[in-house]
Amino acid sequence: MCDKSYNKKTCKHVFLQYTYYFFMKKIFIILIIINAILVSGIIYFTKHQKQVDALQLLQESYSKPHTPSVDHTKFEILQKKFNSPQEVTAACLSCHTERGKEVMNTRHWKWQNEEYIEGRGLTNLGKKNILNNFCIGIGGNEQSCNRCHAGFGWADSTFDFHNQHNIDCMVCHDNTGEYFKQSGGAGNPDPSVNLNKVATQVGKPLKANCGYCHFYGGGGNNVKHGDLEDAQLNCSRDVDVHMAKTGINMECVDCHTTEKHVISGKMYSVSSTNTNRLSCTQCHGNTPHELSIINEHTVKVACQTCHIPTYAKANATKMTWDWSTACKLKNGEPYHEEDSLGNHTYLSEKGTFTWGKDVKPEYVWFNGTADHYMFGDKVDTTKPIAMNTLRGSYNDPAAQIVPVKVHRANQLFDPVNGRMIQPKLFDKEKGKGALWKDFDFDAASAAGMKYIGQPYSGTYTFVQTESFWPLNHQVAPKEQSLSCKECHSTNGRLANLNDFYLPGRDQHAGVELFGMLSIILSFIGIAIHASLRIRAHKRQQTESKTIEQ
Amino acid sequence: MKRKVYIYKAYERFWHWTQAFLVLFLAFTGFEIHGSFEFFGFEHAVVYHNAAAVSFMILIVFTIFWHFSTGEWKQYVPTTKNIKAQVQYYLFGMFKNAPHPVHKTELSKLNPLQRIVYFLLKVVFIPLMVISGVLYMFYRYPHNGDIAGINMEGLSTVAALHTLGAFIMIAFVIVHLYLITTGTTVFTNLKAMLTGYEELEDEPKQTKQ
């Protein structure tokens, strides 16, 4: 702080003088205090009053056990010996007279729904007429696939959807945990099930009821969804804050409320419209965070994006499925291979799989509407074929960023007709074209396409497919939700979602170049100028010395 | 003859140093948000940056009042008079130990180049930062449903302008820090801005330089 003209003592003096001037002026202190108050006030008020009351009330109500108003063991009609599951349904309907009509109006029964799909118009769409990229489709495979139908005996296209007695009440309402459906039995219960016991112990659907199909779809635990699996029957808060046994221990139907057997919530592997959806905000409100800047994110970012950092936390989920390697036999017999966790990595019936545990989701824009691959759609094979398309973009006001599991597969395609192939997979007997019995792609393709009434050229190949599974479950405790940096950084989680400017991730190359150049040039200019000044200063000193001499 | 002059009044110094702190703090937190480095953590950097931005705007409001109530704004009106001489001084004269071409007084503290630079800072660059910053802050998302905000297609343009302005401000600070060493001695100007007092030459006689 001192130049040559001062000695050390005066230097100290000058320093004290500065301090004096700096602090003596009361106005300084007053203004500094005002500013400090303002800054802390601003920081404080950017924090938002949390909406906790409603949530606490809900938590209390969910923690109370449900007391049924009826004891079904006391009903005489349920005491008689049931010879068929249809008789059980008839008994149910004798009291619950209108429930049959309700159920027959739902997707769980119809496996189809009339919905408006952009580009298709009003379309009757569901498992009956779409293909997926797991076991591909139910057409011709009903005996196996339709084990998950809420009915009895849908073994082929002749099934009577108007017979109320075919409704399976028990699969959803059984509270014994003993009811299960026969493998390859077209939805009929296993013969070992004690129907009388089940019929007298029915009630509100439990996790295990929903999970019976929604956990094991695709042929095993957690194969399809990635965020719904049997670990959630008994898990910690780390796996799922809502369903945790040690936490609030919610049942599926606590959120998925039901009106006339129509259950709220949508799964976009089969659904297409932005209606009857569930959202976190129904309980948590629109502004659940303290920081308003975080609340504002919800305009474009779904809650799930930050609060489901990973999925398949307890057990692995299927990530890829290559059908093209199926049909290999050892000594004429099908075989399988497993990974260290006991997941199948190869099955002669199905091909090669890869699995993922604790997987980071991929992220897409989603406005709540979707499209699906329907029978007969011709496809563009230059890019992976989307078995379901989630719609939305940054500029779409209804769209949010959502986390998805993307399941990728390599599956049968008819290059002549330009269509995906529905192979016949299941039959109880050999020689009927079923892939899982005869191990012949061509015969299975011919039989399957014939069954669904689609042409098959006799040529098959394999193409890449993708399916998108929005993740809504396995919500993590709040401490584990994503930090800002997970997205607001280069190579973050949103690295591939490039249709908008994201602070911390995106930079304008031109601005960066200009900025860097202006800083570098400033330093270079200063360096040159300063060195010239120093040289001039030295020259002056030598000159003055010469004069003195 | 030299005399000691109270050249920078209390508020001016308060304004200067608060602004200096805020500009540096905003640059630091801003470039952390920009992704240049990590220090506070993104979330804290955003909160601090926004808080500092609001206090900067409060400071600006007080300072605008000060400029007009004291008439100090006149000091910043650009002039072309002596501008050539000032450029020549920085480029050549200084290395020949030539005297400052423009005389510094209480009523004219700034040389013609300073006038231009500070004028641009006041009417172009700081407003650019404030306006783009406010848009950045109160921007929500386009066509949003519930939360009212300024409707824009995206942050891209605003962010580009805000970053551009930030780079210019940093370049200014670098050059400014260097140029304050070009007073009578290396620390003359710094001392003056700390204490308010500077030793100035008496009005020169009407002799030609």
Image (cartoon, coloured by chain):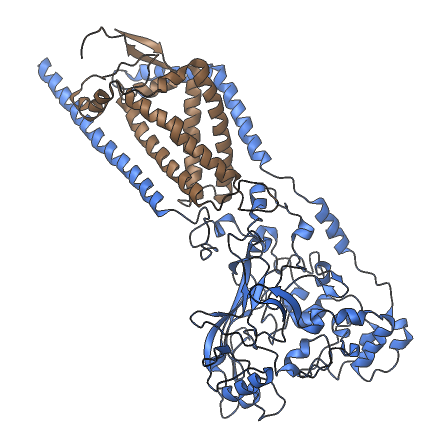
Chain colours: A blue, B brown
Q: Is residue B126 above or below residue B109?
A: below
Q: Is residue B157 left or right of residue A87?
A: left
Q: Position of residue A288 (x, y in %)?
A: 64, 46
Q: Is residue A502 above or below residue A260?
A: above
Q: How many marks?
A: 0
Q: Is residue A365 above or below residue A109?
A: above
Q: Position of residue A485 (x, y in %)?
A: 48, 49
Q: Residue, x 44% and y 22% (percent of image)?
A: B15
Q: Is residue B152 left or right of residue B13?
A: right
**Residue placed farthest to the front in the image?**
A121
Quarter of the image with the C terminus of chain B is top left
Tell me if residue A358 can be seen: no
Quadrant assignment, res B160: top left
Tell me if residue A278 can be seen: yes
Q: Residue, x 58% and y 70% (percent of image)?
A: A224
Quadrant assignment, res A169: bottom right
Q: Residue, x 20% and y 26% (percent of image)?
A: B91
Q: Position of residue A357 (x, y in %)?
A: 54, 66
Nearer to the camera, A154 or A242: A154
Q: Residue, x 87% and y 74% (percent of image)?
A: A94
Q: Is residue B152 left or right of residue A252?
A: left
Quadrant assignment, res B1: top left
Q: Position of residue B100 (x, y in %)?
A: 23, 17
